[in-house]
Amino acid sequence: MMTKSKVQPLLVNYKTLEEFKRFKEYGNQELAMLEDLESNIVENDSESPFFGIYYGSALVARMSLYRVKSKYDKYFTPPQDYLELWKLEVLPDYRGQGYGKDLVDFAKGFGLPIKTNPRINSQAFWEKMDFQKANYDVERDLGENPLIWLPSGVGERETN
Amino acid sequence: MMTKSKVQPLLVNYKTLEEFKRFKEYGNQELAMLEDLESNIVENDSESPFFGIYYGSALVARMSLYRVKSKYDKYFTPPQDYLELWKLEVLPDYRGQGYGKDLVDFAKGFGLPIKTNPRINSQAFWEKMDFQKANYDVERDLGENPLIWLPSGVGERETN
């Protein structure tokens, strides 16, 4: 029987930050979290924008999620708070088992529209998740390929 | 004798858009340009944010460059217009010949600070180009790994 994977918020601690190194999209964000922890700018076990799925004691999938305030919303109508989703990644040995979908479903559960800037070659996955291409606007999007998910009652903002 | 490659602005026309398909980072931006051309929203041969280098008649390297107005500047001090650089890419057969550097030098020639969000595994190249990591700020940077280049007299903005 398929059981739903448990998505949980990830706390900033040395164990989590060590597990992050196994993910391909390890970057400035993770390094900044490590520095903040080392210099006591953040408390051990304080919240992070990351959510993840454990298989046993190993972190096997993660994403970052941030609530953007409606005053900064340039994508949706009516203007509203939305979620920016990034660094969605499942470790190679654990792919094809629905962990990516579990994370996206978790994000959808907040009932807010979602925006993401997908990695190259992930278009098919996002289409299955009912994300659609936003109209590309160079001034707004620059180097991004924005994809959006619209809950019912929400539309895409017109661009010039 | 090494001659400097000639970087030139790329105009929106079917030939250019066809050449763009050879680059890995072909995405929504290029598709939007094609649609705009097809539906006559843009004129044939109108300007694009792309610059490129030709080898004979083939486009072998390109980047996109956009001047962001100082009122949107969250990276530099004093606040000022800066260039956002993205989709810097040299076709595989033409790498290691300085085309990437030629494009970056061209961008630096405007005398403005530059911000880029590099692709995974390109860190070494950007260090050689004298770009440095910006302090990562989740609210500002979300899924980006911002790198910046500071011309003399310009500093990095403090983040929280």
Image: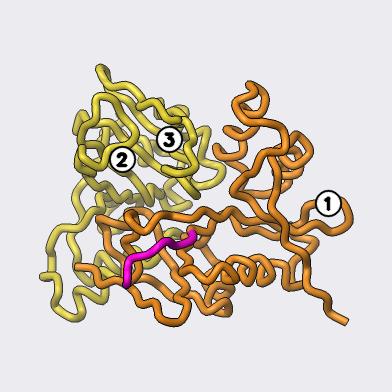
Chain colours: A orange, B yellow
Residue B91 vertical placement versus B68 (above, below): below
Residue B22 visible: no
Cα gap from disc 2 to disc 3, whole angstroms: 16 Å
In terms of secondary structure, what is the magenta stretch mainly? loop
Kindly check if marks 2 and 3 are in contact, taking CB atoms under 8 A apart as contact: no
Residue B101 on image: x %, y %: 36, 35
Q: Which mark is residue A58?
A: 1
- Badge 3 crowding class, 10 Å Cα cut-off, few under 14, some 14 to 19, many 20 or more, is many
- Badge 2 crowding class, 10 Å Cα cut-off, few under 14, some 14 to 19, many 20 or more, is many
Question: What secondary structure is found at the residue carrying circle 3?
Answer: strand
Numbered disc in front, either 1 or 2? 1
Question: What is the quadrant of residue A150 in the picture?
Answer: bottom left
Q: Which mark is residue B103?
A: 2
Q: Which residues are magenta?
A: A78-83
For residue A101, side relative to residue B103 (left or right)? right
Q: Which mark is residue B147?
A: 3
Number of numbered discs: 3
Which residue shows up at 40% across the image and 49% down it? B89
- Badge 1 crowding class, 10 Å Cα cut-off, few under 14, some 14 to 19, many 20 or more, is few
